[in-house]
């Protein structure tokens, strides 16, 4: 029998030793970190690719707050690509395909279209795509004659403020302000519509100064994929929809089919960043990086809804796994994502101090408004459901979708779940949770005398603690009401 000489450690086994610090305020530290070598996040938080955690609403909010969401893969390729598009459209300084109408439509038709689309204005565009004018609700809502042609009530091109395609955010802000207008159509040299900038979109952007954005100003989003042949199609559809990063997400990532998948992705989509996992050793980290992975996801069995360790007997306590993976990955310039088991901001700080660049969080985010599904009420209290992606119900649902038919009892009894279904208290907006997590991390950086996450890696010193140390670390010997 081979047995490692050192104990495997996890978050509760250790504390970080306070270090000399010059930091006077936690607001002066920088929490930015690399998700992959080409994607930097203002906050090192990634929402888990679980069907009770990340669809487009969660991904939008995470990216607005400076993190990123990874869309789960337990939906059809088309649905996942549509989720990507939704995130990409959520916050953009240029609406690339603004809603428009022909100059031939009537006031009544324009009013109907605005109502259906829930928008306050439409560009009026001829059959060659040239801008003729603009109508807003003010032009149509109280118009006495519904059958009037729209060209008679619209603001014509001669009175419309427009801008060239090259208009920057700052220029657009100035133009909108100077002319006191709310919408700025962009036109090319031939007068064809090339986009629309609205004051509302600029205001939205100002509200999220740390948002995670791509080069074109759209929010970034990642997608989980599997390691089967049709996952290459999934990757392609999601990349075409604008996905920024692919996450090959397999429970045992140190497998030949994952290595082959990473190689296939890198050869077919050389510019797409690929994260691969999940692994729990330095050796696995090296193999996936050699296959071409840009970042490594670490965690076998630490998650709140995971029973992999119970069912299979395999896993490595998360702090040890992260530290071993990070030691290998750091020398090769690849970031590590610590995935699973984060319950507090202290766990987050420990995971990063152990060498992770970012953390992936599941059940802590599952109780929020932004996670899929509505809250349920039990005994007057609100909860939301969270389930492992290898849980019985998730397995049954997945197989049903694959077979496109109801499962037989035999199919169900074949399932060996490695995850559980559970409920978590409803917790309001994810922003409040992020605020607490990032606030704790900021304090943690100041206790370490570190202004950045990179400095935290260098300054971190852990001390192992005993059960007495664990007891002492929480509130104790008081009644907590
Ligand atoms: P937390 O603790 O943040 O963990 O809820 C989220 C991570 O748990 C993993 N995950 C699973 N692991 N069986 C497992 O062993 C499962 O059914 C399962 N579902 C999710 C996953 O890595 C996720 O990010």
Image (tube, rainbow, N blue to C red):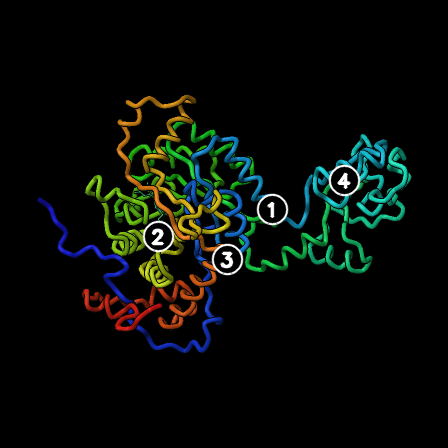
Q: Which of marks 2 and 4 is in front?
A: 2
Instruction: Name the residue rendered at 30%, 24% in the picture.
Output: 411
Q: Nearer the viewer, mark 1 or mark 3?
A: 3
Relative depth, front residue between 30 and 260:
30
**Residue ID for mark 4:** 193
- Decide which of tag 3 and tag 4 comes sooner along the chain: 4
Q: Nearer the viewer, mark 3 or mark 2?
A: 3
Q: Residue 90 carries which label?
A: 1
Instruction: Name the residue rendered at 38%, 37% in the picture.
Output: 262
- State whether label 4 is within 8 Å of ligand 1: no
Instruction: Name the residue rendered at 27%, 47% in the picture.
Output: 280
- Decide which of tag 1 and tag 3 comes sooner along the chain: 1
Q: Do the residues labelled 1 and 3 touch (CB within 8 Å)?
A: no
Q: Nearer the viewer, mark 3 or mark 4?
A: 3
**Residue ID for mark 3:** 431
- Decide which of tag 2 and tag 4 comes sooner along the chain: 4
Q: Residue 338 carries which label?
A: 2
Q: Are marks 2 and 1 in contact (CB under 8 Å)?
A: no
The kind of secondary structure element at disc 4 is strand
């Amino acid at each position: 029998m081979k047995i490692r000489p050192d104990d495997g450690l996890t978050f509760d086994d250790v504390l970080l030793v306070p270090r000399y610090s010059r930091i006077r305020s936690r607001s002066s530290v920088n929490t930015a970190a690399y998700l992959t070598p080409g994607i930097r996040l203002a906050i090192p938080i990634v929402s888990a690719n679980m069907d009770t955690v990340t669809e487009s609403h969660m991904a939008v909010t995470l990216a607005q707050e400076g993190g990123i969401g990874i869309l789960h893969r337990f939906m059809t390729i088309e649905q996942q690509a549509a989720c990507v598009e939704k995130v990409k459209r959520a916050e953009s300084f240029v609406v690339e395909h603004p809603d428009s109408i022909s100059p031939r439509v009537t006031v009544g038709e324009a009013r109907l279209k605005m109502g259906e689309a829930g928008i306050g204005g439409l560009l009026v565009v001829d059959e060659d795509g040239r801008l003729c004018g603009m109508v807003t609700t003010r032009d149509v809502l109280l118009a006495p004659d519904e059958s009037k042609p729209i060209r008679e009530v619209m603001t014509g091109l001669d009175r419309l403020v427009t801008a060239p395609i090259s208009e920057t955010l700052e220029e657009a802000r100035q133009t909108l302000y100077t002319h006191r207008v709310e919408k700025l159509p962009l036109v090319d040299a031939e007068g064809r519509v090339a986009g629309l900038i609205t004051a509302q979109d600029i205001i939205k952007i100002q509200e999220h100064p740390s948002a995670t954005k791509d080069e074109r100003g759209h929010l970034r989003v990642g997608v989980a994929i599997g390691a089967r042949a049709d996952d290459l199609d999934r990757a392609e559809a999601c990349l075409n929809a604008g996905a920024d990063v692919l996450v090959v997400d397999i429970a045992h990532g140190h497998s030949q089919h994952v290595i082959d998948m990473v190689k296939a992705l890198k050869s077919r989509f050389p510019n797409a960043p690929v994260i691969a996992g999940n692994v729990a050793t330095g050796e696995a980290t090296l193999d996936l990086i050699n296959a071409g992975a840009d970042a490594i996801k670490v965690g076998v069995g630490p998650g709140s809804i995971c029973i992999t360790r119970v069912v299979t007997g395999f896993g490595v306590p998360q702090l040890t796994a992260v530290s071993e993976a990070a030691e290998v990955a750091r020398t090769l310039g690849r970031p590590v994502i610590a995935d699973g088991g984060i319950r507090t901001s202290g766990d987050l700080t420990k995971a990063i101090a152990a060498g992770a660049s970012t953390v992936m969080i599941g059940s802590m985010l599952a109780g929020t408004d932004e996670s899929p599904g509505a809250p349920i009420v039990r005994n007057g209290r609100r909860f939301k459901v969270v389930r492992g992606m290898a849980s019985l119900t998730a397995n049954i649902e997945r197989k049903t979708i694959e077979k496109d038919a109801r499962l037989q009892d035999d199919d169900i009894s074949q399932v060996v779940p490695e995850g559980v279904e559970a409920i978590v208290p409803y917790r309001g907006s994810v922003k409040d949770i992020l605020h607490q997590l990032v606030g704790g991390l900021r304090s943690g950086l100041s206790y370490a005398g570190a202004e950045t996450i990179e400095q935290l890696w260098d300054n971190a010193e852990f001390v192992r603690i005993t059960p007495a140390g664990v007891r002492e670390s929480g509130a104790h010997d008081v009644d907590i009401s």
